[in-house]
């Protein structure tokens, strides 16, 4: 078993996609592929970490994939989200018949492959290639509806993405000019030797490049537009896979290059501004997709604040919050897909205009989880982040998160009140059997992690340790003792 | 008269000035142009500037291209091959993104008859 399969299997499948004559077979094999990837990840959870897969030459000269505790958690999230979305797609295409269904599956599986490649690869140039693969697939998926809105979001995303990638190429070139290597381990060892002026330039370029893609404040004006123009399952993927993959790379490089002491306050302030601005903008949105896009941006702001703290407790809490946020947002966007199809509208009123006890329950669960209300998983994540900030005597951050969360509570409770309001005209929505299963699994996970956080805490502690103390990772990345 | 150019420092200076001015031409294009095709072309100019910059700074006077033939029998006296391999890959990626962007532009033009990005503002609340 090799880590290379995480990339190879989806890519081979994508290239074979046009040859599937029967669309049912394509759907089934896409589910099977994502199930395989998820099962492989479950196998890796039982093995000792880190794991390394070489491709012919050993590092630092050759290419390798490394799986450590930090990437394992993200791998679990990505393959799980991929499985859920591929299970959801047959219903979606039955409800909205399309002739170019194969195109979706092609880019969907490539997107999963690219995101996974980005978190596994241990040299910065391969990371850039996976970054571009993920980028190109997300541009195409956001333009999947070839109508005005879809194409507009595709064009916007492509232009923004190209700017980000130019900055990243420039940073990689400067790193190579200064250090003469692209291996992450060697760069991490020698990064402090770079002339401080050039090092500031490199950090700035990497910050702009990955910050743009990870939807950080001054560069995130595009994100709600992209969410509005693309189809709901793709929104779910953007929110729970793509944004999280860029966040992974951002903090992986942040801690590997030892930037935490110098730039911690900067990232924390930017995260706080992201949180504040997004939540206030979300207050007066009338389009559901834009509303939840702004809510995603706000949660990413909290995560950026908590990740940059350099303390195991806070980072572990942030990873918990990230996992629970991924599950909740996937649930919300998949449900929105059902509602938008039945009610033929994207206005916020559709959340008050449907009648289905099941959907109401799962939506309320996910809203309360995003808000951080017990007994759901978001509560554990938020309380761990707050506890971490309090332990490091950063009471300003605690107060800030709590105060801005009130703003978040305003619009979420407004929606919940709208859903429970009996005086509104309701359309009866019946969910397919498969969707019952998917949404029930997602909601059950939210409740499960809320009641038994130790199930997930094991992995988040492992991940936080691997992120903050990458000694093991570096040994493998340098190819010592292989 | 042209011995002047047989100096690594001079060549690097020319390359830095040239590629940076190309870079800012591209940047100016992105910042000022409204036509989608022109913006994509500006991206290409910016990328080319980066490629020139990177390849150029790895050239030193007296070194040859890293291809084994009658000039190069052993792996000495040649420029670093890694940047060239990296740039080749980056060129391919840039081409793919450019093609994708143009195809989006064509589809959008077919639908609306416009290619002005300042008028692409239908995604709003």
Image: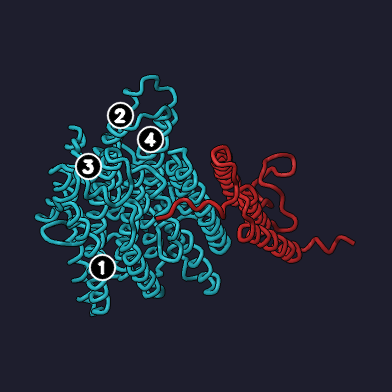
Chain colours: A cyan, B red
Q: Which tag is nearer the camera, tag 4 or tag 1?
A: 1
Numbered circle sitting on residue A10? 4
Contact check, label 1 and label 2, Cβ < 8 Å: no
Secondary element at image label 1? helix
Q: Chain letter of disc 2?
A: A
Secondary element at image label 2? helix
Q: Chain letter of disc 4?
A: A
Q: Position of residue B89 (x, y in %)?
A: 56, 45
Could you tell whether B25 is left or right of A464 in the image?
A: right
Numbered circle sitting on residue A42? 3
Q: Distance from label 1 to label 2 (Cα)?
A: 38 Å
Q: Chain letter of disc 3?
A: A
Q: Residue at x 63, y 60 (%)?
A: B32
Could you tell whether A91 is left or right of A177 in the image?
A: left
Can you identify the residue that label 1 sits on? A407
Can you identify the residue that label 2 sits on? A94
Secondary element at image label 3? helix
Q: Which is more N-terminal, label 3 or label 1?
A: 3
Q: Which tag is nearer the camera, tag 4 or tag 2?
A: 2
Q: Which is more N-terminal, label 2 or label 3?
A: 3
Q: Distance from label 4 to label 1 (Cα)?
A: 41 Å
How many residues crowd mark 1 within 10 Å: few (<14), some (14–19), many (20+)? some
Q: Which tag is nearer the camera, tag 1 or tag 3?
A: 1
Contact check, label 1 and label 3, Cβ < 8 Å: no
Callout 4 and callout 2 share a chain: yes
Which residue is nearer to you in this view: B116 or A115? B116
Contact check, label 4 and label 1, Cβ < 8 Å: no
Secondary element at image label 4? helix
């Amino acid at each position: 078993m090799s880590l290379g399969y995480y990339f190879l299997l989806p890519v081979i499948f994508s290239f074979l996609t046009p040859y599937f004559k029967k669309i049912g077979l394509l759907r089934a094999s896409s589910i099977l592929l994502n199930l395989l990837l998820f099962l492989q990840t479950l196998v890796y959870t039982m093995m000792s970490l880190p794991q390394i897969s070489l491709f012919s030459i050993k590092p630092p000269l050759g290419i390798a994939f490394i799986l450590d505790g930090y990437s394992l958690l993200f791998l679990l999230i990505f393959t799980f989200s991929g499985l859920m979305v591929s299970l959801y797609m047959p219903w979606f295409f039955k409800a909205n018949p399309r002739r170019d269904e194969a195109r979706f599956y092609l880019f969907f599986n490539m997107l999963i492959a690219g995101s996974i490649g980005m978190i596994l690869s241990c040299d910065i140039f391969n990371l850039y290639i996976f970054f571009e693969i993920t980028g190109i697939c997300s541009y195409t998926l956001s333009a999947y509806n070839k109508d005005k809105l879809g194409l507009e979001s595709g064009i916007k995303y492509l232009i923004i993405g190209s700017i980000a990638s130019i900055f990243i190429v420039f940073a990689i070139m400067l790193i190579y000019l200064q250090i003469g290597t692209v291996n992450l381990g060697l760069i991490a060892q020698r990064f402090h030797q770079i002339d401080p002026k050039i090092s500031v330039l490199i950090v700035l370029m990497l910050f702009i490049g990955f910050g743009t893609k990870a939807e950080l404040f001054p560069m995130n004006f595009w994100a709600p537009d992209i969410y509005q123009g693309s189809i709901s399952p793709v929104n779910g993927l953007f929110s729970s896979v793509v944004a999280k993959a860029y966040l992974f790379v951002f903090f992986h490089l942040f801690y590997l290059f030892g930037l935490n002491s110098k730039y911690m306050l900067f990232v924390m302030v930017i995260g706080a501004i992201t949180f504040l601005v997004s939540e206030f903008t979300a207050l007066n949105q009338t389009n559901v997709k834009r509303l939840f896009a702004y809510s995603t941006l706000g949660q990413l702001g909290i995560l950026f604040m908590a990740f940059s703290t350099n303390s195991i407790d806070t980072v572990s809490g942030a990873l918990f919050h990230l996992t629970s946020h991924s599950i909740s947002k996937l649930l919300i966007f998949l449900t929105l897909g059902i509602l938008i199809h039945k009610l033929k509208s994207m206005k916020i009123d559709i959340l008050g205009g449907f009648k289905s006890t099941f959907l109401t329950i799962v939506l309320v669960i996910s809203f309360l989880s995003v808000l951080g209300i017990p007994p759901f998983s978001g509560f554990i994540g938020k309380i761990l982040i707050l506890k971490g900030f309090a332990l490091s005597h950063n009471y300003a951050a605690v107060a800030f998160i709590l105060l801005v969360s009130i703003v978040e509570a305003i619009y979420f409770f407004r929606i919940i009140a709208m859903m429970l309001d009996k005086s509104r005209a309701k359309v009866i929505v019946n969910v397919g059997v498969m969707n019952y299963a998917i949404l029930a699994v997602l909601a059950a996970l939210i409740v499960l992690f809320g009641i038994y956080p130790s199930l997930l805490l094991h992995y988040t502690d492992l991940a936080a340790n691997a992120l903050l103390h990458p000694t093991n990772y570096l040994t493998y990345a340098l190819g010592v003792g292989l | 008269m042209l011995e002047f150019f047989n100096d690594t420092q001079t060549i690097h200076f020319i390359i830095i000035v040239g590629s940076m001015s190309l870079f800012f031409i591209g940047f100016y294009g992105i910042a000022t142009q409204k036509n989608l095709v022109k913006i994509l072309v500006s991206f290409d100019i910016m990328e080319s500037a980066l490629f020139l910059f990177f390849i150029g700074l790895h050239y030193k006077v007296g070194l040859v291209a890293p291809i084994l033939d009658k000039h190069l029998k052993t792996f000495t006296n040649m420029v670093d091959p890694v940047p060239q391999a990296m740039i080749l890959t980056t060129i391919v990626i840039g081409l793919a993104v450019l093609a994708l962007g143009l195809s989006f532009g064509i589809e959008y033009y077919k639908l609306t008859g416009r290619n002005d990005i300042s008028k692409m503002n239908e995604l709003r609340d």
